[in-house]
Amino acid sequence: MTLRRTLQGLLALSFAGLGISVYLAFEYLTGGTPICSGSSGCSQVQLSPYAWIGPIPIPVLGAVVYVALIVLAALALTRPEQQPLVVLALFGISLAGVLFSAYLTYLELFVIIAICKWCVGSAVVMTLIFVLAILAYRQSAAESA
Amino acid sequence: MGKNSPGRKQPKKATSPIGWIVAAVVVVVGLLIGVSYFSNQSKTPSGTAGSVPAPTGSVPAPAGPVKTDAELGAKGSVKGPDSAKVKLVEYGDFQCPSCGVAHMKQEPLLEPLITSGQVQFTFKHFIVVDANVGGSESQWAAEAAECAGDQGKFWAMHDYLYEHQNGEGKGNFVLSRLKQFGATLGLEPVAFNKCLDSHTYSSRVKQQSKEAENLRLEGTPSFLVNGKLVKDGDFVKAVKEAVK
């Protein structure tokens, strides 16, 4: 897989993550509950105090991170001269995303004791993005060596 | 030259920035997790839990001006006119964190519909937390809201309780503390304290909880829109649909 392909994959996954975050953020801010295929997990998670940091719903935070990843991935694809630096930024931001997703999944499993499928979906997407960011970093280092 | 030999600097040049990035990210995420986790954990006061009144000292002032039920268009625990097209009923427990979130994040979305007379919002007690964590703080908090209602401030106390949750069964809603809440809301203390101490509304609260059990409600908060239980707490959407 070439660096270009890796970045394209990362870009596509970031759009998927953004889709999930925007949907959840919309439901949180308009008082709806996400579709949860018959389980009450999504609303239990949504109504837990951990779903918000002050006035900010967690999905809004997710959307911001996914937008940042999209911008950076697009930048890396279109500006090869800045690629090494941008790939590092992608690594850093996706690491932050994956650590925070792990914390949220911990909260779901052991504190709230309810699973929100959309949140798990976002955590999986973020983990894949992180794996691709590591790959992109290694490919970029190999190219510039 | 001898002390700052260039040879010593060379390994630094070769150091990848990745280590610094990882360290910076761990610190930033750690801070964020700290804020998220402890802003909720700190609601659990230190000290002994259970029936021992742990927190002492003054209580926080209300967030805004304290409005009476009359000013809010309410009669006791019923807010909004009887002629309202949509009747929303909440069965809640003042200690339940989800009820607090629903109150602070979702109910404000319905406030305009209540003010305009399209929706009537009734709050009823469903005491569930006491059985889970021990103690009687949910029961007492519910009685405090009813006692405040005697002085035309049911909703002021309702809002204050939800907005000042501080752990479940940790001494935040013990009688001495509820009396302080009453004082901070400007309630006449002799009558309010007597109402609390003599558990004037104990049977009303228990009656409403029984009613919730008879409706087979599974927990709090449970919302009924025009008598129908709304699935998954999706009450804002259901109310807006019903208003149309």
Image (cartoon, coloured by chain):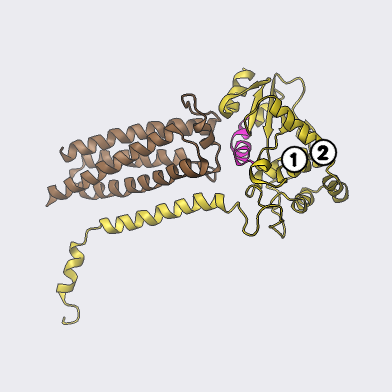
Local secondary structure at mark 1:
helix
Q: Badge 1 is on which residue?
A: B142
Colour seen for chain B: yellow
At a point 21% along the width and 49% down the height, the residue shown is A84
Q: Badge 2 is on which residue?
A: B201
Q: Three-letter amino acid code at disc 1?
A: Ala
Q: Which residues are magenta?
A: B96-110
Q: Is residue A24 left or right of residue B207?
A: left
Q: For mark 1, name the chain.
A: B
The answer to whether dots 2 and 1 both sit on one chain is yes
Local secondary structure at mark 2:
loop
* Label 2 Cα crowd, 10 Å radius (few <14 / some 14-19 / many 20+): some
Q: Quadrant of the C terminus of chain B?
A: top right
Q: Position of residue B12 (x, y in %)?
A: 21, 66
Chain seen in brown: A
Q: Three-letter amino acid code at disc 2?
A: Tyr
Residue in the foreground of this view, choosing between B134 and B158: B134
Q: Quadrant of residue A66?
A: top left
At a point 40% along the width and 43% down the height, the residue shown is A101
Q: Quadrant of residue B90?
A: top right
Name the chief secondary structure element in magenta: helix
Can residue A82 be seen here? The reply is no
At a point 74% along the width and 50% down the height, the residue shown is B174
